[in-house]
Every structure is written in structure tokens, then in C-alpha cells.
Amino acid sequence: MQLTPQKTDDDFLREAIQLARDGMMTGQGGPFGAVIVKNGEIVGKGSNQVTSTNDPTAHAEVVAIRDACQRLGTFQLEGCTLYASCEPCPMCLGAIYWSRPDRIVYGSFHSDAAGAGFDDQFIYEEIEKPRDERHIPMQQTLRNEANAVFREWVALDKRILY
């Protein structure tokens, strides 16, 4: 019986990097790729599809999370590792935290992406600003009405916690 050698972090990261290259070369989107691995097997894949789908949230990590959750039949990725060709942007990092994988392994730094024209530094800076100083104006209203839905959620017997 021949044993299959176990893949390493570098092997899985190379898969994510190849997805970045393939997606870029086929016109799907920018040069970003991601895979999600559970128990040594890839359970989710994604390449950037922002321009091909006209979806600004279709970053490689988000596409891979959607794929993995669909395949695994869950909205949580405990026991998984996310491999990304580049350090996740703030949006992707939020999605990653919500999906709860055990760890993240990435290739390039976000500063490397900035050098290629993908600069998300302005988002990091916006997050740090008070709401009333952000570039996109924010207005809060109807708090009591909106909070009523939270009260209904708390009272709901059939709610699924996450």
C-alpha cells in the first residue's frame, strides 16, 4: 500500500497562488486566490471575481468561504485553514472572522498588493476615524424601531446562534 504524502502549508498556499494566476489570466478578476482546507483536503476554492461578476464583495477569500460553507453544509469553518495568496483586506478579514476558521496562512502582504494597484490602506484609515469624519457620510436614525427586531430575535425560540 502506497501512502500519499501529506500536503504542507506551502503546498496549499501554492494552490491559492495558482488560483490567483488562473483567475487573472482568464479575466475573472484581480490576482487573488484562496483555498480552504479541512483534514488535509481542499473544501473550498476561490479566485477574485469582482470584475467578472460586477460584485465588489467577490474577493477570493469570500468566494472560497461561500464555496466551503456550501460544500460542508455549514456557516462555520471550525477545523479549517484558509490559505490566501495575499493578506486579507478588511472586508475579507471580517468575513473570515465570521466564518471562524482555525487559522489563516497568506503569501503577500497587503502593502505588496498596494504596489500592484490594490491599495486598501484608505479602508484601514476610515475604520479608525469617528463616524462623522468618514469619507462616506453615515446617518443613524430609527434606532428604537431597528432594535425591536433584536428584541424579537432574543425572544425567538427557533433562532440559530452564531
Image (tube, rainbow, N blue to C red):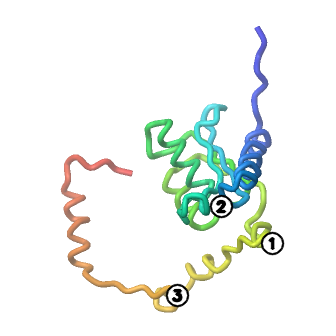
- Between the C-alphas of marks 3 and 1, the distance is 24 Å
- Between the C-alphas of marks 3 and 2, the distance is 22 Å
Q: Indicate the amino acid at tag 2.
A: Pro
Q: How far across and down, in percent of the image, does residue 135 sit?
A: 54, 88
Q: Indicate the amino acid at tag 1.
A: Gly
Residue 115 badge: 1
Residue 56's image quarter?
bottom right
Q: Earlier in the sequence, mark 3 or mark 1?
A: 1
Q: Nearer the viewer, mark 2 or mark 1?
A: 1
Residue receiving disc 2: 88
Residue 122's image quarter?
bottom right
Residue receiving disc 3: 134
Between 68 and 149, the one nearer to me in the picture:
68
Q: Indicate the amino acid at tag 3.
A: Arg
Q: Earlier in the sequence, mark 3 or mark 2?
A: 2
Residue neighbourhood size for the residue with mark 2, other residues' Cα within 10 Å, grouped as few (<14), some (14–19), many (≥20): many
- Between the C-alphas of marks 2 and 1, the distance is 15 Å
